Structure formats: C-alpha cells, structure tokens
C-alpha cells in the first residue's frame, strides 16, 4: 500500500495552488470591503477552504518529504512558513465567524502577514523544485554579483598562448565539475556520497568507492557513469541537466587514462590542441590569422627595437606582432632582412615613409602571416609586386602617395585574399583605359578613377 502514500505525496505540487487561490481571493475581498463586512459570506467561504487546503498542502508536503528523501534543513523553513500560513488563515476565519473580533484594522494587518507568509512559503517551495537560483538564474552574471547571488562559473576559457603550461586538472577537469556536477556533488548535496569540489574530495570517491581504476581506466566509475546512454538513470550528469560536450568528455577520459594527475601540464600530457579549441576566446585576432605559435624570443625583439622598429602585439597576450618603422626612416631593402627571425609573427608591417623599393618584396614575400602592409609615401612602383601573390593572409595594402604604376595593378588581380588596396594620390599619371574586373572594383581604391558619366552630372542647380 506504500504506493498510495507515494501518490499522496506527489499531489503536493498540485494541492499547494489551492490555498494560494482561496487565500488571495479572501484577502482581496477584505481589502475591498473596507470597514464593513460587505462580502462576509464569501469571505468566510474563501478562508474556510483556504485553511482546509493549506492543511491538505501541509499533509501532502510532509508525506512527500518522507517519501522522496529531501534533507530536513532544505525543507524546514518551507514547512514552518506553511504552518504560519495555516495559523493566520484559521485566525482570520474565526474572526470572520465572530468567534472573536479584532477590529478592521488589525484584521488587515493579519492579511498583510498572511500574504507575506504565502509568498515566502511559495518561493521556498519553488526553490526546492526548481533550484535555489531559479529566479535569479536568467540574470546576467554582473547583476547576480551585485545582488550577492553566487553563480556558477559556466564558461571555461583558456588563453591559447599559455594554456599548455597549465595543469589539465586545473584548466579543464575542475572547471567542468564546477559547471556541471557540483550542483549535486557538493558537501551540501553530496548525492551518491560523492563530492567533486576539489582534488582531495574527488580522490575520496563516493558510495561506490574510488572513481578511478588503475588497471582499466575505461572501467573507472566516473567514466562509466559519463558514458552510459543518456536514457540510463545512472547516466551523469542526469538527463535533464546540461551535458558534457564532446571535447570535455574526451579530455576527462584522457585525464583518467593518465592516472588523474593533479599537477601534470597539458604540455606534458601531450594532448592535441584541437581538443581545446572550444575553450579559446573566439577569434580575438580580428582580421589577422587565427593561429597559435610560440611567442618570439625576447632577445630578438629587444635587438629589433634597438634598431628602431616599433613592435607591439595585436592584443596583450598574442604572439602576433605589428611592426612599424615610423621612427626608422633609414629603413631600406637591406634592413628588411633583419625581420626574418620573426617572419611568422608579423601580421602587420608599416614601411611608410621609408627608403624601400620594389626589391623589398623579396623579403616581404617570406612573411607567411602578413595581413596588412603599409607602403605609403615610398618609391614603390609595383614592378615586383607580383611576388606577394603567394601570401595567403594578405588583405590590405596601402600605396597612398607612391610611384606605383597603375598598369601593375593587374598583377594583384590574383592575390588570393586581398580585400583593399589603397591607391590614392599616386604620383604618376595613369591612363584611364584600365579596366578593372567588376568583382575587384571595390578592392582597388583609386581617387582619380573616373566615374561613368550620369545624365544628372550636367544638371545645373
Ligand atoms: C542533478 C543532480 C546531479 C548532477 C548535476 C550530477 N549528478 Fe552525479 N549523481 C547524482 C545522484 C542523485 C547520484 C546518486 C544516485 C546514483 O548513483 O545514480 C549520483 C551519483 C554519481 C556517481 C556515483 C557515485 C558513487 O560512488 O556511487 C558519480 C561517479 C557521479 N554521480 C558523477 C557525476 C559527474 C561526473 C557529474 C557531472 C558531469 C554529475 N555526477 C552530475 C546526481 C547528480
């Protein structure tokens, strides 16, 4: 007959809505009737059934607590406020029945308390079924911080330059547990007697003993639970919760295969970069290539700066560099050689106002990641610019105020990634017979490019 009790308990979430309805209606009538008992019979009716249904809610709630294994400290306040609601509802009912009379004003104060208790009870009950953060969960994190609500750090972010030196456990394993497991596996909740909040607690294991199996890592309790089919009751995290991503899954397996070390770095464990791709900040590189390379050596950079190069990374921790010769006016085709030790790091190169000629392209063509090239105010005429056609990242070239000869423009038609070539203010006159293909017209910006004549051009205003 146990199942009947079980079912009674399960009616609690339904029954609780009745007192809310009856008691709110009764409260409204008390406010509306002012200092007379306009709706007396209906008010009595409302509070009578309000009290009865509150009692029912308390009984079903208590049964549910007993049957479904809630922790006492989790439900006690909800229960206490439920009892307070019952006491106030009964008091108001007796008052309406004239068993005793307290005066209109005091009755209204009682009604305020009733509503307050109802709201608190309902809110605490909601927290039990939907989780403590049910109301605040949709707020942005900074709002939650202001309200003092603690929020799980959901997003795992790695720095693509330095992540290899971090320990796999610190960088991935614990953050994954924090985001997806500890809502049920903390010292407070401890489902399956398992706590996952830090390394020692993870090593302690749960009801079923250690989470790890040295002999056969794939048979580890932790992996077994994660790899069970989603439908399986024992699958972790439970079906209704946010699941592990594929790479999180693989990384946990790798971690366990390596013996679940605390300190071992990602580098030492030799784990492929692809598995971390989803944790990297989304393309912070802008128009520059999204690659990860080891940073240039400090000594090399120091020497270059001494020569007069201005060097800055594209963002603080990036190994990709912007180089400018803004203070290095003697820079010439030969000096360009000195950039070769950092040829992979250079994504933007500003040679404006320097002494370079077209020979410099022999060096520049060796900068595989070059994206932006500035050659304004130089003697470049384009005679060798075709050398740049092998650059797979080159998007912008600035040729403002140069000796560029416009017939050399055709050499750039097959540049694979070119987006913008600025050709304003060329020193040499050019013939206007040049026919740029339609698809490239927006790439080459020519100040003197003659627009087709429109009829409206001759209108005199
Ligand atoms: C919604 C709550 C919830 C979440 C979230 C959750 N678990 Fe559990 N977990 C449970 C419950 C309940 C049990 C005990 C019942 C059982 O063994 O299935 C359990 C048991 C386990 C056990 C077995 C412990 C033992 O020793 O028997 C493991 C391992 C486990 N969980 C791992 C995880 C991992 C890893 C995550 C996160 C990826 C996770 N759980 C997320 C509720 C949860």
Image: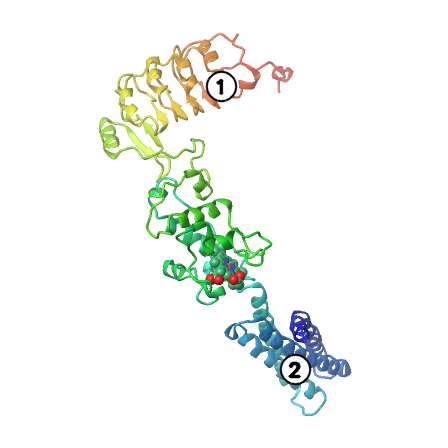
Residue 125: image tag: none
Give whichever of 225, 187 is nearer the camera: 225
Cβ of mark 2 under 8 A from ligand 1? no
| Residue at the (55%, 64%) spot, across then down | 131
The image quadrant where one finds the C terminus is top right
Inter-mark Cα distance, 2 to 1? 81 Å
Helix, strand or loop under label 1: strand
Q: Is residue 375 above or below residue 205?
A: above
Query: Does any portion of residue 355 appear in the rendered image?
Result: yes
Identity of the residue furthest to the front in this view? 215
Count residues near mark 1 (Cα–Cα under 10 Å), then give few for <14, some for 14-19, many for 20+.
Answer: many
Name the residue beneath numbered marker 2: 89
Q: Is residue 296 above or below residue 45?
A: above
Helix, strand or loop under label 2: helix
Cβ of mark 1 under 8 A from ligand 1? no
Count residues near mark 2 (Cα–Cα under 10 Å), then give few for <14, some for 14-19, many for 20+.
Answer: many
Look at discs 2 and 1 and give the one toward the viewer: 2
Question: At which x and y percent is residue 443?
Answer: 50, 21
| Residue at the (36%, 18%) spot, across then down | 377
Q: Does 21 sit left or right of 216 as displayed?
A: right
Give whichever of 396, 252 is nearer the camera: 252
Give whichever of 15, 193 is nearer the camera: 193
Name the residue beneath numbered marker 1: 444
Q: Earlier in the sequence, mark 2 or mark 1?
A: 2
């Amino acid at each position: 007959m146990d199942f009947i009790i079980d079912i009674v308990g399960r009616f609690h979430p339904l029954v609780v809505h009745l007192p809310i309805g009856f008691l709110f209606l009764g409260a409204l009538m008390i406010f509306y009737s002012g200092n007379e008992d306009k709706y007396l019979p209906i008010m009595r009716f409302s509070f009578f059934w309000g009290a009865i249904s509150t009692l029912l809610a308390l009984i079903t709630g208590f049964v549910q607590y007993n049957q479904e294994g809630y922790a006492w400290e989790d439900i006690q306040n909800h229960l206490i406020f439920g009892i307070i609601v019952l006491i106030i509802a009964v008091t108001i009912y007796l008052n309406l029945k004239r068993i005793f009379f307290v005066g209109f004003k005091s009755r209204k104060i009682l009604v305020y308390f009733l509503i307050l208790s109802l709201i608190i009870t309902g809110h605490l009950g909601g927290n039990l079924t939907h989780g403590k953060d049910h109301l605040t969960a949709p707020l942005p994190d900074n709002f939650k911080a202001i309200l003092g609500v603690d929020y799980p750090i959901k997003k795992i972010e790695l720095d693509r330059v330095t992540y290899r030196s971090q320990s796999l456990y610190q960088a991935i394993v614990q953050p994954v547990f924090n985001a997806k497991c500890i809502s049920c596996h903390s010292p407070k909740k401890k489902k399956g007697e398992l706590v996952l909040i830090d390394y020692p607690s993870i090593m302690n294991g749960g009801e079923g003993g250690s989470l790890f199996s040295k002999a056969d890592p794939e048979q580890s309790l932790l992996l077994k639970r994660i790899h069970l089919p989603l439908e399986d009751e024992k699958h972790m995290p439970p079906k209704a919760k946010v699941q592990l991503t594929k790479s999180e899954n693989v990384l946990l397996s790798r971690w366990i295969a390596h013996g679940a070390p605390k300190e071992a770095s990602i580098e030492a464990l030799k784990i492929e970069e692809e598995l971390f791709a989803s944790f990297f900040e989304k393309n912070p590189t802008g128009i520059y290539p999204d690659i990860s390379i080891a940073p240039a050596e400090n000594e090399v950079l120091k020497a270059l700066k001494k020569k007069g190069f201005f060097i800055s990374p594209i963002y603080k921790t990036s190994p990709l560099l912007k180089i400018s010769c803004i203070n290095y006016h003697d820079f010439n085709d030969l000096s360009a050689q000195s950039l070769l030790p950092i040829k992979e790091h250079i994504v933007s190169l500003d040679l404006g106002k320097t002494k370079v000629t077209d020979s410099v392209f022999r060096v520049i063509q060796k900068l595989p990641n070059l994206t932006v090239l500035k050659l304004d105010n130089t003697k470049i005429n384009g005679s060798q610019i075709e050398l740049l056609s092998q650059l797979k990242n080159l998007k912008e070239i600035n040729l403002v105020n140069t000796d560029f000869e416009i017939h050399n423009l055709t050499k750039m038609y097959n540049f694979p990634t070119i987006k913008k070539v600025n050709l304003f203010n060329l020193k040499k006159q050019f013939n206007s017979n040049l026919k740029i293909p339609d698809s490239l017209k927006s790439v080459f910006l020519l100040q003197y490019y003659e627009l087709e004549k429109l009829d409206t051009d001759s209108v005199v205003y």
